[in-house]
Each structure stands twice: as C-alpha cells, then as structure tokens.
Amino acid sequence: MPTDRKEKISFDTHAGKKLRNRRIQLKLTQTDVAHATNKTFQQVQKYEKGVNGMSGFVLGEVARYLKVP
C-alpha cells in the first residue's frame, strides 16, 4: 500500500504544479480560479501545493477554466 500513497502524492503534486504554472501563464490569481470553481482560495492553494488532491470533477472544472484539455 505505501506504493499507492506515493503515486497519489506524486500525481497531486504534479497536477498542482501544472495548475500553478498555467494560472500564472494566464495572469490569474488563486482567487480567480477559486471563484470560477466555487472553491476558496485556500483550497486552490492546497491543490497547488499538492496537499489536497482534486477530484475528477474539480480537475475538469479547473481544466475548462484554464483552457487546457
């Protein structure tokens, strides 16, 4: 089971980095992303750090807002 946990952390961290890079590229704030996805900026902050993982639904919302496939 430790392998599963490592893979989860790895994916969450990777997704968070991609979110942050794209958000900065589009000159958006964490608050902008939070409002668009009906989350708090603290939650977006945790997504970007990889502390919390995004559900598939939230990942889709964020991707749509940031205009990525």
Image (cartoon, rainbow, N blue to C red):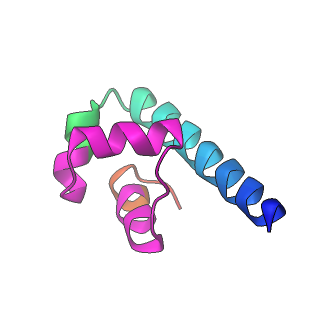
State the residue lying farthest toward the bottom. 57
> Which residue lies at the image location 75% right of the left edge and 58% below the top edge?
7
> Which residue lies at the image location 20% right of the left edge and 46% below the top edge?
40
The question of residue 6 being in magenta is answered with no
Where is residue 59 shown, x and y percent of the image?
45, 62
Q: Is residue 30 left or right of residue 40?
A: right
Where is residue 21 shown, x and y percent of the image?
51, 32
The question of residue 51 being in magenta is answered with yes
> Which residue lies at the image location 41% right of the left edge and 53% below the top edge?
67
Q: Is residue 46 left or right of residue 4?
A: left
Q: Is residue 7 left or right of residue 44?
A: right
> Which residue lies at the image location 39% right of the left edge and 49% below the top edge?
66
In the rendered view, tell whether residue 41 sits above or below residue 6. Answer: above
State the residue lying farthest toward the right. 3
Query: Within the image, what quadrant is residue 4 found in?
Result: bottom right
Q: Nearer the viewer, residue 14 or 67?
A: 14
In the rendered view, tell whether residue 46 sits above or below residue 36. Answer: above
Range covered by the magenta-colored residues: 34-62
Where is residue 31 shown, x and y percent of the image?
20, 36
Q: Of helix, strand and loop, which mostly describes the magenta segment?
A: helix
Query: Within the image, what quadrant is residue 42 found in?
Result: top left
Which corner quadrant holds the N terminus? bottom right
Q: Is residue 51 left or right of residue 10?
A: left
Where is residue 51 shown, x and y percent of the image?
50, 44
Q: How many marks?
A: 0
